[in-house]
Image (cartoon, rainbow, N blue to C red):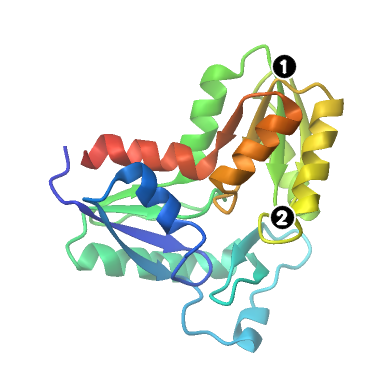
């Protein structure tokens, strides 16, 4: 068991993640403190625009401090993530969580780094055999990535897109599509999706829904108590 009740959290966007961290703490409990850092902290809109994905780039969607969303390419974000993660380890924090379900290269450090993509994938894979799986991603241009990631999970997969940072009707429509496709299990494949969004998708589809932030927080709770 990790003794420290202070954990680090690094977003691929800007901190603080007021849309995310408070919900993590509702699961972790009042005795846990989260220290945040963001890969895009301190950058202007023009500077962030230079990180926009081009053809064949791995696309990431994240939230800025003003509440808006932005697309960035993984290749630009990974070095900045590594720097922020190491900065938290250097402060003596033993556990750092990555607030993104995207896929990244290995990022070795001096502590324990929890990567939501691996946790989400393996939990889903463990319960999805024989089921028709619905996967919700933030943007349509992420669907090819999702297909590549999830094609071996469940007996069949249905991919839809709906931003957690935009019009709520977008998620409702995506959920309706999954209902019409008779999916039997849904994955909300982004840390931006909230507990309320999970409830909404569950109500519309009638299927169990796995939420990335919920799964991550419960693993952290197992580690820190």
x and y percent of residue 33 in the render?
26, 58
x and y percent of residue 175 in the render?
77, 37
x and y percent of residue 34 in the render?
30, 59
Answer above or below: position of 157 versus 21. Answer: above
- The alpha-carbon separation of the residues under discs 1 and 2 comes to 26 Å
Q: Determine which residue is flagged by label 2.
A: 163
x and y percent of residue 44 in the render?
58, 87
Is residue 189 in view? no
For disc 1, the neighbor class at 10 Å (few under 14, some 14 to 19, many from 20) is: few
Answer above or below: position of 223 versus 11. Answer: above
Viewer-closest of 217 and 132:
217
Q: Residue at x 67, y 11 (%)?
A: 130
Q: Residue at x 64, y 65 (%)?
A: 73
Q: Residue at x 30, y 39 (%)?
A: 221
Quarter holding the N terminus is: top left
Residue 166 horizontal side relative to residue 193, left or right: right
Quarter holding the C terminus is: top left
The numbered mark at residue 155 is 1
Q: Residue at x 32, y 42 (%)?
A: 220
């Amino acid at each position: 068991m990790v003794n420290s009740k202070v954990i680090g959290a690094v977003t691929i966007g800007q901190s603080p993640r007021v849309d995310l961290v408070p919900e993590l703490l509702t699961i972790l409990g009042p005795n846990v403190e989260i220290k945040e850092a963001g890969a895009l902290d301190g950058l202007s809109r023009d500077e962030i625009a230079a990180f926009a994905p081009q053809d064949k780039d791995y696309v990431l969607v994240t939230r800025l401090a003003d509440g808006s969303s932005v697309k960035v390419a993984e290749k630009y974000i990974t070095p900045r993530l590594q720097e922020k993660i190491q900065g938290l380890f250097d402060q003596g924090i033993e556990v750092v969580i990555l607030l993104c379900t995207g896929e990244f290269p290995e990022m070795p450090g001096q502590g324990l780094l929890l990567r939501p993509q691996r946790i989400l994938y393996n939990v889903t894979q463990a319960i999805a055999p024989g089921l028709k799986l619905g996967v919700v991603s933030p943007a349509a241009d992420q669907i090819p990535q999702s297909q590549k990631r999830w094609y071996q999970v469940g007996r069949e997969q249905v991919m839809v897109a709906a931003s957690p940072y935009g019009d709520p009707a977008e998620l409702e429509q995506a959920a309706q599509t999954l209902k019409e496709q008779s999916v039997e299990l849904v994955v909300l494949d982004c840390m931006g999706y909230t507990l309320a969004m999970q409830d909404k998708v569950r109500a519309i589809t009638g299927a169990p829904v796995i939420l990335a932030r919920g799964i991550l927080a419960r693993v952290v709770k197992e580690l820190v108590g």
